[in-house]
Image (cartoon, grey):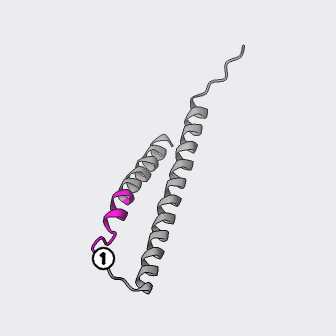
Amino acid sequence: MIKFFTRAIAALAALAVTLTVAVPASADTGKAPAATHGQEAAAASGDVTQALVVGGFAFVLMIAAAGAVLWFTARKRHHEPR
């Protein structure tokens, strides 16, 4: 069970690094200075989508990390009578 859990955390971390590097790298930085209103709206929509994807993924990773800490703490806790 612990091997599966550590592999899942490692896979999530690798995915987070990949998305962190790939999403900004895939953005089109060579835009023409004079864009039409429709093109500006499309670019703004893409920015909002990117922000939602990155923010949602960060939220999921934070919840997974908190769950991992709680699970690891509960697993290592020994109930000793006083």
Quarter holding residue 47: bottom left
Identify the residue at horizontal 57%, vertical 29% (top origin). 76
Instruction: Say which of 63 and 50 sits in front.
Output: 50
Q: Residue furthest front?
A: 34
- Residue 44: percent from left, percent from top: 46, 74
Q: Residue furthest right?
A: 82
- Residue 6: percent from left, percent from top: 45, 43
Residue 75 vertical placement versus 78 (above, below): below
On screen, residue 13 versus residue 78, left or right, reads left
Identify the residue at horizontal 61%, vertical 27% (top origin). 77
Mark 1 closeness class: few <14, some 14–19, many ≥20 residues within 10 Å: few
Q: Is residue 21 magenta?
A: yes
Which residue is under mark 1? Answer: 31
Q: Secondary structure at mark 1?
A: loop
The amino acid type, in three-letter code, at marker 1 is Lys
Q: Is residue 26 magenta?
A: yes
Residue 38 vertical placement versus 19 (above, below): below
Identify the residue at horizontal 58%, vertical 44% (top origin). 67
Q: Quadrant of the C terminus?
A: top right
Highlighted magenta segment, given as a residue range? 19-32
- Residue 31: percent from left, percent from top: 30, 76
